[in-house]
Image: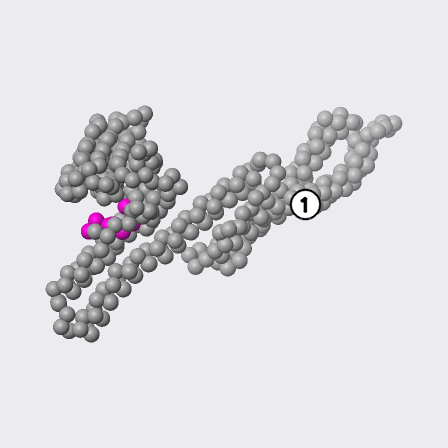
């Protein structure tokens, strides 16, 4: 197998199968020697020794030793050979599952994540290792597929504003008499959208890595700050924005948690149609968890659409906006990533009369 560049070279050693074989043979040899020692200690030492010239004493130790020693030597040789052969066979059978696991590891190392071991038989250490390896491969395959899908979607989304900018520049070059003010305004809007998308992608990548600095954060204060920031937008759309609840402390990044709450409130305000609806931000400490719930009125959402709302660039029906608050389709995806980085859970549920209820549960603090 090719050695990875990061691994230091190692001198070749004995295989595990050979080590087990030598261990089995050595154990049998030691056991046989101990058995012979016991025979000598408890039997032969009580037999009279003929070395003093005693006549008429039969059997004697001298004769027994001459008779017993060759047989004992052959027995020891047989035990050693039997230990080597039997140990080699038994070690091969015992290590056979490890061979399958090694083969699957090599396939995974070559980029094939779809292979599974699916080890059969009763539960033992190798079966537990194989099941854990299959679970790891399944999660890794899902993560890689998600990253590839995200990269493809991000490339597509970033290509759109760049293509629009290129088109506007081509039009300006072909028509020098065109109004420069309108061109600059449109370029500025497209550029701002590209910047928002890039910042959202960077934030999503940062929260996915999970390398955050934790501190004590009160979700009630985070919810109030997010609501205060988006209050002008809610008033512009004729939406009532309420903040209720009690203190709910958790451990995490204040910046990321504020972005999480802001995304939730902005999503609830922007997609709250028709005008005149309500958005409620509620915080509470429940059962050792800190809860942030954002509820909004609006059009009914198909239940089959709810699981896709946290996917990047999934805006869903009745969710694509064309105004200045259209977003980039990463709002709930960023929320989901931030919640996951803080070891929490995110629950989305539709309201019977229309709208959405988003509940965030994070580990609480006293």
Which quadrant does the C terminus fall into? Answer: top left
Q: Position of residue 146 (x, y in %)?
A: 40, 50
* Residue 244 shown left or right of residue 66 in the figure: left
Q: Name the residue: 51% across, 51% down.
A: 114
Q: Position of residue 83 (x, y in %)?
A: 69, 42
Pointer 1 residue: 89
The magenta span reads 324-331
Q: Quadrant of residue 126?
A: top right
Q: Quadrant of residue 198?
A: bottom left
Q: Is residue 247 magenta?
A: no
Of 1 and 140, which appears nearest the observer? 140
At mark 1, the secondary structure is helix
Q: Name the residue: 60% across, 36% down.
A: 122
Q: Quadrant of residue 186?
A: bottom left
* Residue 305 shown left or right of residue 116 in the figure: left
* Residue 256 shown left or right of residue 311 in the figure: left
Neighbourhood count class around disc 1 (C-alpha, 10 Å): few under 14, some 14–19, many 20 upward? few
Of 128 and 160, which appears nearest the observer? 160
């Amino acid at each position: 197998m090719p050695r990875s560049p990061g691994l230091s070279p190692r001198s070749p050693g004995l295989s595990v199968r050979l080590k087990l074989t030598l261990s089995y043979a050595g154990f049998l040899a030691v056991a046989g020697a101990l058995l012979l020692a016991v025979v000598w200690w408890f039997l032969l030492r009580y037999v009279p020794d003929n070395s003093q010239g005693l006549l008429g004493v039969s059997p004697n130790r001298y004769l027994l030793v001459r008779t017993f020693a060759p047989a004992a030597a052959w027995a020891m040789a047989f035990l050693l050979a039997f230990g080597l052969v039997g140990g080699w066979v038994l070690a091969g059978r015992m290590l056979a599952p490890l061979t399958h696991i090694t083969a699957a590891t090599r396939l995974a190392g070559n980029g094939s994540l779809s292979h599974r071991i699916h080890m059969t038989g009763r539960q033992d250490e190798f079966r537990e290792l194989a099941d854990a390896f299959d679970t790891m491969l399944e999660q890794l395959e899902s993560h890689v597929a998600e990253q590839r899908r995200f990269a493809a979607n991000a490339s597509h989304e970033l290509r759109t504003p760049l293509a629009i900018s290129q088109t506007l520049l081509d039009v300006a070059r072909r028509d020098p008499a065109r109004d420069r003010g309108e061109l600059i305004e449109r370029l500025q809007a497209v550029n701002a959208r590209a910047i928002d998308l890039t910042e959202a992608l960077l934030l999503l990548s940062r929260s996915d890595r999970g390398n955050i600095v934790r501190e004590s954060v009160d979700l009630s204060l985070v919810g109030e700050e997010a609501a205060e920031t988006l209050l002008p937008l809610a008033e512009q759309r004729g939406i009532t924005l309420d903040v209720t609840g009690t203190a709910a402390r958790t451990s995490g990044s204040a910046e990321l948690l504020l972005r999480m709450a802001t995304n939730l409130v902005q999503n609830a305000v922007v997609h709250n149609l028709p005008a005149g609806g309500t958005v409620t931000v509620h915080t509470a400490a429940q059962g050792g968890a800190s809860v942030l719930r954002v509820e909004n009125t609006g059009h009914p959402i198909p239940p089959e659409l709810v699981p896709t709302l946290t996917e990047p660039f999934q805006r869903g029906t009745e969710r694509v906006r064309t105004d200045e608050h259209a977003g980039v389709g990463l709002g709930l995806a960023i929320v989901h990533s931030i919640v996951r980085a803080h070891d929490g859970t995110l629950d989305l549920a539709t309201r019977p009369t229309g709208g959405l209820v988003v509940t965030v549960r994070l580990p609480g603090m006293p």
